[in-house]
Image: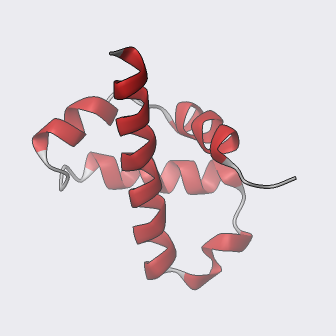
Amino acid sequence: MEELIRDKRKKIIARLVSELARENMDLYYTDSMTVSSLVVEKIAQKKLPKQDYDLVKDFSARDIQILLSYNSSCC
C-alpha cells in the first residue's frame, strides 16, 4: 500500500515539473531547490484534483528536492 502511495506521489510531482517545464523552457538549467519551490507553489494553488492534492499537500520544498533526486535518470 505504501509503495502505491509513493508511486502516486512521484507521478504527481513529475507531472507538475513537466507543467513547469512547458511554462518555462529555462527550467532545465534551474537548480533543484528552486524547481522544488516552484512545485510547492503549484501545489499551494490547489488546482490539483482533491485526491492528488491530499497526497502532496504536506510536502516541503526539501521533500520534493529529495524525491526528484531519486527519480533522476542521470549517471
Task: Name, please, the residue furthest toward the bottom.
Answer: 25
Q: Is residue 14 above or below residue 61?
A: below
Residue at 64 percent across and 34 percent down: it is 66
Task: Name, please, the residue furthest toward the right.
Answer: 75
Residue at 61 percent across and 44 percent down: it is 68
On the picture, is 10 further left or further right than 27?
Answer: left
On the picture, is 20 further left or further right than 25?
Answer: left
On the picture, is 65 further left or further right than 14?
Answer: right
Colour scheme in use: secondary structure
Query: In which quadrant of the rendered view does residue 2 lie?
Result: top left
Q: Is residue 53 above or below residue 55?
A: below
Query: In which quadrant of the rendered view does residue 3 lie?
Result: top left
Residue at 31 percent across and 48 percent down: it is 43
On the picture, is 27 further left or further right than 51?
Answer: right
Q: Is residue 20 or residue 38 the one in the foreground?
A: 20
Residue 53, position as x, y percentages in the image: 22, 40
Where, quadrant-wise, is the N terminus in this rendering?
A: top left
Residue at 33 percent across and 34 percent down: it is 56
